[in-house]
Amino acid sequence: MIKHFTLTLKKAYRHRAMSNKTQSSTFQTKVCKVDPTSIHFDGKDQLTISDTQTETYLEEAAQLLSTTSNVVAFPTETVYGLGGNSFNDESIKNIYKAKNRPSDNPLISHISTPSQILEFFDVEIPEIYKPLISNFWPGPLTILIPNVPGSKLSQYTTAGQDTVAVRLPSHPIARALIHLANCPIAAPSANASTRPSPTLASHVFHDLQGRIPMILDGDGAKVGVESTVVDGLSSPPMLLRPGGVSLEQIREFGGELWKDVVIAKKLSDDSLEPVKTPGMKYKHYSPTAKVVLVKNEDSIGEYLKEHELTDSKLALLTCENFKGEGFKGIVQSLGNTKPEISANLFKALRHLDEELSVDLIFIEEVGLSDEGLAIMNRLQKAASENI
Ligand code: TXA
Ligand code: MG
């Protein structure tokens, strides 16, 4: 049976044209090159910055966050974040506005040292997190702590949840920015809502140009997928979003209580259980091109025979096993190991979509162990078909 893509493609082109049109320009977005290697924290969390330009830009960004309600995009080791002051209602509203993000999806607050959990949120670190914190912070792990009444947090940061998501990133620019601003920085990924997360400053510029005043450009985000979100307040503890720290690592290094960690139900399960993490229910990571996730390389040929795609620009992203031999289109490798695949995934999707205007992207599936769980979680959300 021949299935016709003409309609889908027309829709895709319209989407492409519209997403440019709806961007209202309010700011002259400044892209500021900063050098992560010039930043040093000593054992007592004292900060020194050896490069003057980096110091000037970081001071300026910190001022924007601590004294105004403006937002700033900055690099983290996972993806670029769009930061606002977690205590400031207007700043948080500006994040939602710039990204066009639904306001019932709460934000992660970023800190630069664990003692800020008590200082900023009036909460002692719950015991269950201590082994995770000592093994994975600074790094790509987000924990949920109680949201105590009377704390200074904006209600918009937590979107009415009774918990606060907190992360201590390892990227020197992120840590220095939080340290200088001296407030928790709420930051979702710095993409326009539903688009793939940005791993380069140029991705942020593409999506948010004219909508934010400043982007700190501190090179590529090395992990490439977002942080792992865990809830140790529920029993058994839960993995809410797979990410830069794997389920295996949590089980291995989290201590006794994390051995029983369960993966939160996906919304696609037909259950009445409320969604534990609001981000789950939203479409995500989607390039304008159609994405088809492929288990077996031979099924690509069959798929192409079945569908009339004569005018379509095709691409194939290979991972551990596919060869791409004879494929009529762009063939690109995401890498041979899972860390490489995770680091390259969003960058490759954006490149094919935004620079090469590909219509259909086939992607090789990976196994679910280690980084595979986070990679497949992103791929399933990007894909509209599995073959
Ligand atoms: O790596 C990352 O986590 C990046 C960088 C910038 O730090 N940030 C990021 O933020 O990915 P965002 O907003 O794109 O994703 C945050 C996720 C969402 O799925 C949200 O629903 C969930 O964390 N979340 C935030 N607060 C929560 C809470 N109190 N309870 C449950 N889930 C929460
Ligand atoms: Mg995001």
Image (spheres, rainbow, N blue to C red):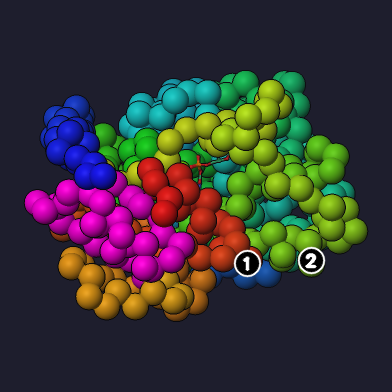
- How packed mark 2 is, by other alpha carbons closer than 10 Å (few <14, some 14-19, many 20 or more), is some
Q: Which residue is mark 2?
A: 253
Q: Position of residue 203 (x, y in %)?
A: 28, 52
Q: Which residue is located at x 69 percent, y 41 percent? A: 264
The quadrant of the rendering that contains the N terminus is top left
Give the CA distance from mark 2 to mark 1: 14 Å
Q: Is residue 247 visible in the rendered structure shown here? A: yes
* Amino acid type at mark 1: Asp
The quadrant of the rendering that contains the C terminus is bottom left
Q: Which residue is located at x 84 percent, y 43 percent? A: 236
Q: Which residue is located at x 80 percent, y 45 percent? A: 237
* Region rendered in magenta: 289-318
Q: Which residue is mark 1?
A: 370
* Amino acid type at mark 2: Phe
Callout 1: helix, strand or loop? loop
| Residue 298 is one of the magenta-drawn residues | yes
Q: Which residue is located at x 47 percent, y 33 percent? A: 282
Q: Earlier in the sequence, mark 2 or mark 1?
A: 2
CB under 8 Å between discs 2 and 1: no
Q: Is residue 125 above or below residue 101?
A: below
- Please give left or right for residue 296 compared with residue 371 in the image: left
Q: Quadrant of residue 21?
A: top left
Q: Position of residue 18 (x, y in %)?
A: 17, 30
Q: Is residue 200 visible in the rendered structure shown here? A: no
Q: Position of residue 86 (x, y in %)?
A: 55, 33
